[in-house]
Image (tube, grey):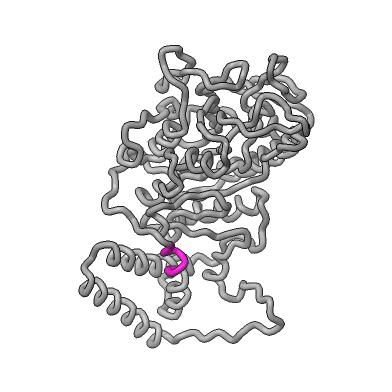
């Protein structure tokens, strides 16, 4: 990566303001618990019906299950059918790298509450999610520590290191100002400082920041100013990357994958979030078949590509990254009057990649789709154990990524069965 000229300062300052957000970083950081890994969050937004693939319930009284058969893929029993070939293709190719988690208790049926619980491990929307924590603990030096391409994320006190690129990949506006799409017929003429002017501007900003910290003491204002100056430096590093995916993409996984993998491959980000929707099928639950087919087809392309791309360490991206495929909730066992299914406080998840106990089923549900008690070390059903809850899953993901979960989720038992 080449050094940048001072003329990039204005764009960097703009990025700093965008990245600053409303929060500040915490005052201490936990030591990594294990090998540091990237984290890629894939959000199946809306609440998926786990009986369509991950938690088969054929011929189960009390469960309105779709058509299909149970097929074993390297130890993973998955529900498949001709109307969702993407599911079969994915597990044919990658079951050995997957841990399947069933019976996660979310303890809510509200979308926002469930999303916060599944991603942060807490019931608070102001807590940082697992991606923000991993980025803070392991990726502060990266230009874009936490890259958010979807809508569902919680940055909490780590807002300054998160970049929300949005549905049109606004990172292009920083990397290449000429890529901005202007609504007006004639784009405005932009002014750019020369090297000397940019140097004066940077010196002024640094002087003003130092003066404010001297006058007001370090405290919260000082931390915010340090976040701002750090964001300027990270934005200048980002400018050196050149291309980073296409502009004007939609909610399909394909275009988001292009951006996410470029960010991980080039060492721009430690954590990335992408999103696919909408699984909220209150009417016409059969749409879950199409949604599952598209999601798992996208996951196949994602993992295939990560297997052949080389990451910053020299290993494949898949060997450097933990992939967590999560939906905030499940759907009821029975159909409603509109042939849809409503919200259900138990769900499943899929964890793929580096350090993962592949080909393993962790947890279980009963014939009513309620979570069973398990042994958190082995993942096997155990009447002396307890069900998997959202906090244990989040703590387990942090540990997999190489972050000690204890400072972030005290008194929570991590789901150690995820780890190989």
Residue 117 point in image, percent of width and height: 48, 39
Residue 391 point in image, percent of width and height: 43, 34
| Foreground residue among 368 and 71 | 368
Residue 112 point in image, percent of width and height: 54, 44
| Residue 413 showing in the rendered view | yes
Residue 142 point in image, percent of width and height: 41, 58
| Foreground residue among 8 and 201 | 201
Q: Is residue 91 above or below residue 157?
A: above
User: At x 72% / y 35%, what residue is drawn?
Assistant: 288
Name the dominant secondary structure of the magenta segment.
helix
Q: Quadrant of residue 384?
A: top left
| Foreground residue among 48 and 99 | 48
User: At x 21% / y 74%, what residue is drawn?
Assistant: 215
Q: Quadrant of the C terminus?
A: top left
| Foreground residue among 287 and 402 | 287
Outermost front residue: 337
Magenta highlight on residue 313: no
Q: Is residue 397 above or below residue 17?
A: above
Q: Quadrant of the N terminus?
A: bottom left
Tell whether 380 sits left or right of 411: right
Tell whether 387 sits left or right of 365: left
Magenta highlight on residue 20: yes
Tell whether 126 sits left or right of 107: left
User: At x 45% / y 76%, what residue is drawn?
Assistant: 8
Give the total number of marks visible in the rendering: 0
Q: Which residues are magenta?
A: 16-21
| Residue 316 showing in the rendered view | no
Q: Quadrant of residue 111?
A: top right
């Amino acid at each position: 990566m080449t050094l940048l000229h001072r003329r990039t300062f204005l764009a960097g300052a703009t990025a700093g303001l965008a990245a600053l957000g409303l929060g500040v970083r915490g005052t201490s950081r936990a030591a990594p618990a294990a090998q540091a890994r990237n984290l890629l969050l894939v959000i199946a937004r809306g609440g998926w019906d786990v009986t369509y693939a991950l938690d088969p319930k054929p011929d189960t009284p009390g469960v309105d299950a779709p058509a299909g058969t149970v097929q074993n893929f390297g130890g993973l029993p998955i529900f498949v059918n001709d109307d969702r070939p993407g599911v079969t293709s994915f597990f044919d190719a990658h079951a050995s790298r997957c841990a399947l988690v069933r019976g996660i208790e979310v303890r809510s049926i509200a979308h926002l509450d469930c999303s916060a619980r599944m991603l942060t491990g807490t019931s608070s929307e102001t807590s940082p999610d697992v991606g923000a924590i991993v980025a803070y603990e392991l990726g502060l030096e990266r230009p874009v520590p936490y890259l958010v391409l979807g809508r569902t994320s919680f940055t909490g006190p780590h807002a300054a290191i998160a970049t929300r690129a949005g549905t049109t990949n606004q990172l292009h506006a920083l990397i290449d100002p000429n890529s901005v799409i202007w609504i007006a017929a004639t784009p405005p003429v932009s002014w750019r400082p020369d090297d000397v002017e940019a140097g004066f501007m940077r010196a002024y900003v640094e002087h003003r920041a130092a003066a404010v910290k001297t006058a007001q003491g370090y405290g919260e204002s000082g931390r915010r100013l340090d976040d701002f100056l750090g964001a300027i430096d990270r934005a200048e590093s980002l400018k050196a990357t050149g291309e980073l995916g296409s502009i004007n993409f939609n909610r399909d996984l394909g275009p988001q994958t292009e951006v996410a993998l470029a960010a991980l491959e080039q060492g721009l980000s430690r954590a990335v979030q992408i999103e696919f929707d909408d699984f909220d099928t209150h009417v016409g639950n059969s749409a879950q078949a199409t949604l599952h087919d598209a999601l798992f087809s996208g996951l196949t392309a994602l993992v295939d590509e990560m297997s052949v791309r080389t990451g910053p360490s020299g290993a494949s991206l898949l060997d450097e990254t933990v992939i967590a495929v999560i939906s905030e909730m499940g759907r009821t066992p029975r159909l409603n009057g509109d042939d849809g299914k409503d919200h259900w406080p138990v769900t499943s998840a899929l964890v793929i990649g580096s350090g993962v106990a592949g080909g393993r089923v962790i947890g279980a549900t009963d014939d009513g789709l309620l979570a069973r008690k398990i042994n958190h070390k082995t993942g096997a059903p155990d009447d002396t154990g307890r069900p998997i809850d959202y906090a244990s899953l989040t703590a387990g993901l942090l540990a997999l990524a190489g972050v000690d979960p204890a400072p972030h989720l005290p008194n929570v038992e991590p789901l150690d069965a995820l780890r190989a």
